[in-house]
Image: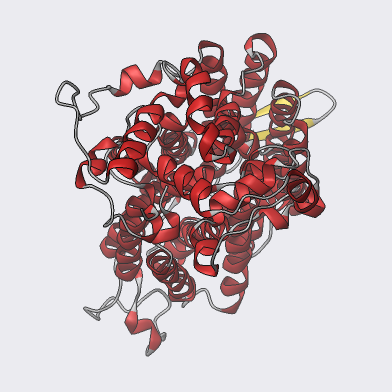
Amino acid sequence: FGFQSRGIMNEPKIFMSMRGRHFKKEIAKIEKWRAKGEFLPDSNEDEVDHTSLSQKIKLLKPENRFPLFLNLLSCFLFMMNNYIIEPSSAYYAEALGSSDALSGIMVGAAPWFAIASAIVYSYWTNHNYKQPILLAGILQFIGNLMYSSAYSYKSIEMCLIGRAITGLGAPRVINRRYVADATPFELRTVASASFGLATALGAALGPGMAIILDRIEFEFYIPLVGEHYFNGMTGPGYFMALNWFIFTITILLTFSEPTRSGLDELKQREDVMESPSSKRNALLENNSTSYEGTACDANILDDAVVCLKSTDTLPTTSQNDSEDDCSVSSDTEDDKLTNSGATSKISASCNPSYHCCSCMSHITKPVVICMTLIFAQRFALESIVGSTSIITKNRYGWRIKNVGTLHLVNGLIVIPVSLLSGYLSTFYEDRFMALCFLVIALGGMTILFDPTDLVNQENYSYNSDDLLSTNSVEYIIGSLISFSGIEACESFVASLISKVIPSALAQGTFNAGLLETLVGTGGRATGDVFITLMGLRSIRGLLNLLIIPGAVLIGTSVLLVLANYEILAV
């Protein structure tokens, strides 16, 4: 019969049009084809899925909808919080008596501490969502106040402590896990695209507000604290503190615990995969009511293929063997590779309440590939975005409003791109779309590369008299293309990792959301430190020092996807 990740050539061509159909019907059709050796389409049945996106959204349980909105809102505020300080970071570091290059540490302090808090939040969300997201809001409020108050005391230390507290309040791991736990498989890519859209909106409105706040300047007095200043450098912190205060009150009054229907669906899928061939039909019949009209209503052909492949090619083991080994082996080493996702899911289900020590044993090759892609994307993106204020200030003489305008346009362009991504996800596989947007991002980073800086750095700004140099217009174009490509790609990789993740990593403390957040935040934090190190080495050649490593990572990601394209089929 063949496995999809090993090639679809052995399947009837009509099977390609079965994507989005009922899982039970897919199994029945494949069983018929296996038994008779031919495929006879039902003339009374329309082979095209006419289910609209609005109808599919109804599959999301009502009690999960408003909490999902609040999670997306917290994602929006967090990204807005990150990007609202980017335009003024270099100027704020200078005002506090530090080097421009230290703005990378100022921005990167938050993601480094976010890595530590992510593990705590992940453990907490095993049992509760409301309490950790409340704590995150409170920490964001305190951290932003300290960040802005540092100006009054001319203290870079206070500024960094405020950023660290902001990092401790990072809610990304909570948001990602909610998307994975509370949304059905059929809406997973759409939900991930919505997550990307919230990220894009935050990335757009953050710099937009920075432009507005740069025009406002006044002093105010707080009893027992003293004189404070509201300007283009401190305004972002005060503004975000107010937003997080309102958000925290909203969570306290309205948030309710969701039903983890997405996790339940994953377990149902694995129950089908684990069932022997003789019991498969009975299990599907018994669960047909729960499949039809729910999130499991339109599972794709790949799952049917995985089900048959796992039950027909994997040897049957005794109950004692399965309990002792808690795993199932394939006939060949090649099957082990192609079925790595399926076999790991079966293995993981034997021990659902696993601990950190067994986490690595459940990480499959597709998961490692996805995490590598996430790290490379976040590192490259931070190298571009986090360094904008430093590069444009010293290279093109830009001010806060110029940097804010560029980030605003970046975010605004990503919004339609994210909407397009959600639409395209209903027609194309995640692996294909991720590859396309990686190539687009690589093209944008190629535009940012300045070959003249490799041979001449005598000018203080850039080689404006050389046609091959990267001028401000080319910098804007390259930044827009690379930013949009990486942000759009992230939604597909996030969807991909949530689908290839074993069930043992879809629940518990060390879950897919935590791994994705740790890797993504780690990439961002590493990018910020890299900006500071390269800035201390050379402000004049900073553009190439950041773009070349970032482009190499994105190019390597493209090759990684191409080399492992088959095993990323979901």
Image position, residue 408 (x, y; %): 38, 42
Residue 458, by quadrant, is bottom left
Q: How many marks?
A: 0
Q: Residue furthest right?
A: 224
- The way the protein has been coloured in the rendering is secondary structure
Q: Residue furthest front?
A: 36
The answer to whether residue 363 of the structure is visible from this angle is yes
Q: Which residue occupies the foreground of this view, 96 or 362? A: 362
Position of residue 88 relative to residue 70, above or below, is below
Q: Which residue occupies the foreground of this view, 440 or 471? A: 440
Q: Residue furthest left?
A: 43
Name the residue at 65% across, 13% down. 256
Q: Is residue 423 left or right of residue 109?
A: left
Image position, residue 528 (x, y; %): 60, 60
Image position, residue 378 (x, y; %): 52, 56
The answer to whether residue 103 of the structure is visible from this angle is no
Residue 481, by quadrant, is bottom left
Q: Residue furthest bottom?
A: 455
Q: Is residue 425 left or right of residue 349?
A: left
Q: Which residue occupies the foreground of this view, 410 or 420? A: 420
Name the residue at 53% across, 15% down. 66
Image position, residue 460 (x, y; %): 43, 77
